[in-house]
Image: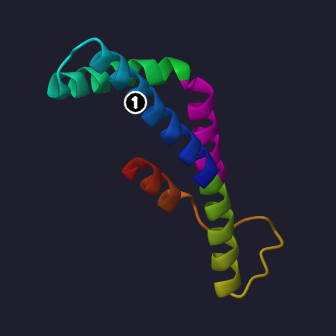
Amino acid sequence: MVRAALVYTAGRIAIFGVLLALLWAGNLGSYPGILFALLLSMPASYFLLGKQRADLAAARIERREARARLRGRLRGSSDGSDGSDGSDGSDGKADRQQDTQQ
């Protein structure tokens, strides 16, 4: 997940930097240039970094599922069961609460 986040963040910063350089080359002052570059980089990043955004979302989902599996194994081992039946002993309420908080 860290790699996907770094790639996406680097892409966002690169797009902002290119737009800022173009606006400064067009004689737009520093403060307005920064603001316009920031405003223009948002939609540009949305369209240009679609694959990286999807990779980041997939990595976040994979990490959440891995944490849920680990949580299930830990809960299974703490109540004396070996976890071989495939259930984690919870009704999913805690997972739904965590998802709504995010």
Is 26 included in the stretch rendered in magenta?
no
Could one spot residue 55 in this view of the protein? yes
Could one spot residue 79 in this view of the protein? no
Q: Could you tell me how many numbered marks the image carries?
A: 1
The residue lying furthest to the top in this view is: 26
Can you identify the residue that label 1 sits on?
Answer: 17
Is 54 included in the stretch rendered in magenta?
yes
Q: Main secondary structure of the magenta part?
A: helix
Q: Quadrant of residue 37?
A: top left
The residue lying toward the viewer, choosing from 100 and 66, is 66
Residue positioned 55% across, 26% down in the render? 49
Q: Is residue 97 above or below residue 73?
A: above
* 58 relative position to 86: left or right: left
Residue positioned 79% across, 81% down in the render? 82
Magenta segment boundaries in residue numbering: 49-62
- Circle 1: element type: helix
What colour-coding does the image apply?
rainbow
Q: Count neighbours of disc 1 (C-alpha within 10 A) and say few if under 14, some if 14 to 19, many if 20 or more.
A: some
Q: Quadrant of residue 76?
A: bottom right
The spot of residue 44 in percent (x, y) is 44, 18
The spot of residue 92 in percent (x, y) is 56, 58
Q: Is residue 90 above or below residue 95?
A: below
Residue positioned 28% across, 11% down in the render? 26
Residue positioned 58% across, 39% down in the render? 57
* 29 relative position to 2: left or right: left
The spot of residue 60 in percent (x, y) is 58, 48
The residue lying toward the viewer, choosing from 97 and 9, is 9
The spot of residue 95 in percent (x, y) is 52, 57
Q: Is residue 43 above or below residue 101?
A: above
The residue lying toward the viewer, choosing from 66 and 44, is 44
Q: Amino acid at mark 1?
A: Gly
